[in-house]
Amino acid sequence: MSQKITVKLNDQVVKKTGRQEKKRAVFETNQLNLWYSDTHALKDINLSIKEKEVTAVIGPSGCGKSTYIKTLNRMVELVPGVRTTGEIKYKNRNILDRNFRVEDLRTQVGMVFQKPNPFPKSIYENIAYGPKIHGIKNKKILDEIVEKSLRGAYIWDEVKDRLNENAYGLSGGQQQRLCIARCLAVEPDVILMDEPTSALDPKSTLRIEELVQELREDYSIVIVTHNMQQAARISDKTAFFLNGEVIEFDETDKIFTNPKDSRTEDYISGRFG
């Protein structure tokens, strides 16, 4: 029987077995460089994002965190003047290859933004929108998807009697969980989160963090956060970005208790950033 090891970090107890199950990589970023016109925003990025783990991306403003995760579903290409070199493999296919259909990628790699952005539609239609785009018209199936997605985002009990009301009537925290439910409705493989709690109050932030902990059982999650305590609480791996480079990438407990690079230690100890 494998020996059990218990790691405690910021009151979070995570049980690990001595014989770790080898997880496959969903994303492999190799020598990725990105420029906004003449600005070199990402420099030789090498990262491996594993399945059913939460990977936190931390670093000061302007270091390339959000730019990086927006390369993972190619949303960064919406910015004029962007060019890239290197590769990003998603399940062993280079998504930067122009033959890779971006529509397929964004179905499998969902995104939740910093500010909740529900559609100006009913709660029901917010969730049903994606499945309808993918050809699902059967009302019974749509009803099941809506309920399953809202339950998955831990908001069903709060909205089940309000499904025909406009989503704008929800609180900020509820809107963010609705946006997560909308993401779940198309059954993605990966969920990208760009500072999803920065506009929320502490109670709503806690609900989102608890939700992320539940979702890691079924999804690979990459979360950009300025909140280092949040990264320590909810992530398995942490990448520290600085000036467009990955300075250090390791298991979260190692990053926060025994960083290898002095710049990482300076950042997490509050000396800059």
Image (cartoon, grey):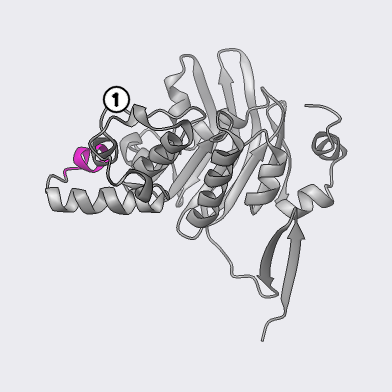
In the image, residue 253 above or below residue 2:
above
Does the magenta segment cover residue 62? no
Q: Is residue 146 left or right of residue 168?
A: left
Residue 64: % across, % down: 63, 28
Using the image as rendered, state which of residue 231 and residue 77 is in the foreground.
Answer: 231
- The amino acid sitting under disc 1 is Pro
Residue range in magenta is 129-135
Q: Which residue is located at x 63 percent, y 15 percent?
A: 39
Label 1: which residue?
120
Are there few (<14), some (14-19), or many (20+) residues within 10 Å of tag 1?
Answer: few
Residue 65: % across, % down: 62, 31
Residue 198: % across, % down: 59, 31
Q: Is residue 71 left or right of residue 46?
A: left
**Prevailing secondary structure class for the magenta stretch in the rendered image:** helix
For the question of whether residue 196 can be seen, the reply is: yes
In the image, residue 185 above or below residue 1:
above
The outermost residue toward the front is 161
The quarter in which the N terminus is drawn is: bottom right
The outermost residue toward the left is 138
Residue 50, by quadrant, is: bottom right
Residue 103, by quadrant, is: top left
Using the image as rendered, state which of residue 256 and residue 122 is in the foreground.
Answer: 122
For the question of whether residue 251 can be seen, the reply is: no
Label 1: state its secondary structure.
loop
Q: Which residue is located at x 49 percent, y 60 percent?
A: 217
Does the magenta segment cover residue 131? yes
The quarter in which the C terminus is drawn is: top right
Q: Which residue is located at x 53 percent, y 44 percent?
A: 208
In the image, residue 78 above or below residue 253:
above
Residue 126: % across, % down: 29, 35
Q: Is residue 7 left or right of residue 195?
A: right
